[in-house]
Amino acid sequence: MAGAVVTRFAPSPTGPLHLGHAYAAMVAHDMARAAGGRFLLRIEDIDRQRAKPEWEAQIYDDLRWLGLDWDGPVMRQSERLPAYRAALADLWARGLLFPCSCSRSDIERAASAPQEGAPHGPDGIIYPGTCRGVPARGPLPEAALRLRMFRAARDCSFVETGPRHKGTQRISREHLVHAVGDVVLARREMGTSYHLSVVLDDAAQGITHVTRGEDLSEATQIHVVLQALLELPAPTYCHHSLIRDPDGRRLAKRDDARAIALYRAEGATPADIRRMVGLTSDRG
Ligand code: GLU
């Protein structure tokens, strides 16, 4: 149906779902259901070292227990490598990528200013440009590949709603070049990257509203550049606040954060989880 809301929850099966994940899933689910739209699930398992089938099984189980029923088939990133490689081959052929052989410490050393350390952007240290001059000829190499941001960036804009922003954000070319830089689009061991995969998958799943934590709001700049380059529709971005413990520390990514499975084992109900993350248990 044209104009219908389509949201998604996109967990990585690298550990148990925590309260922060439950919150993200509920926000996406509730938005779709309230609009009579669709709520989709995507398993972000491109990190083959860390993704485990048992965590994936636990995700399905926890979501079902929470009453978060998803629509249609689950998309799994590990099955989408050909689509990622095709997009990379396109960008490569257009001279928008270069291979990079820098290690983390090479980058840290080259990027560090004497007193201040290395400047950081939404994808870690802003790349100092060491390999930018490497010629990009021939077929797509099996290498780490970075985006030539200077060529890729034109003024982009996106619609963001959420706790801190409302309305259209404009990002200038200058900002993209200096404050974001030549981000990695393919890691050598993965053949893709979070940024490339998420953009291609959101488009392939027809996502109209990306709801996710505000920790990813800076990464959205990279995503809108990729959407412009690959001529993909740009969804609306809704960045929600993160669930924190009583000391103000983020819960979702902390190793000792409480897993949904633990609350379940202790007898909590899905309504209790909703209350814990600040969402009412009344879905009406
Ligand atoms: N897989 C990412 C995570 O678990 C979510 C990515 C996104 O929502 O764009 O943090």
Image (tube, grey):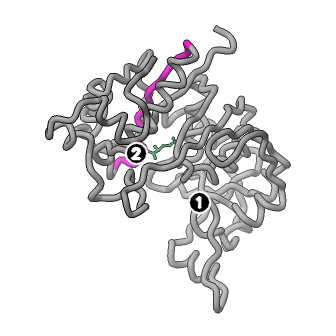
Q: Give the residue drawn at x 81%, y 48%.
A: 170
- Give the x, y percent position of residue 26: 43, 31
The answer to whether the residue labelled 1 contacts the one labelled 2, judged by CB atoms less than 8 Å apart, is: no
Q: Is residue 24 above or below residue 256?
A: above
Disc 1 to disc 2, C-alpha distance: 21 Å
What range of the chain is rendered magenta? 36-48
Q: Quadrant of the N terminus?
A: top right
User: Residue type at mark 1?
Assistant: Asp
Quarter of the image where one finds residue 110? bottom right
- Give the x, y percent position of residue 85: 57, 40
Q: Is residue 199 above or below residue 129?
A: above
Q: Is ligand 1 closer than 8 angstroms to the Cβ of mark 2?
A: no
Q: Which residue is mark 2?
A: 20
Q: Mark 1: few, some, or many residues within 10 Å (few <14, many ≥20)?
A: some
Q: Tell me: 179 left or right of 208.
A: right
Secondary structure under tag 1 reads: loop
Q: Which residue is mark 1?
A: 123
- Give the x, y percent position of residue 38: 52, 17
Q: Nearer the viewer, mark 1 or mark 2?
A: 2
Secondary structure under tag 2 reads: helix
Q: Give the residue drawn at x 77%, y 46%.
A: 169
User: Residue type at mark 2?
Assistant: Gly
How many marks can you see? 2
Mark found first going from the N terminus, 1 or 2: 2
Q: Give the residue drawn at x 44%, y 54%.
A: 189
- Give the x, y percent position of residue 281: 37, 27
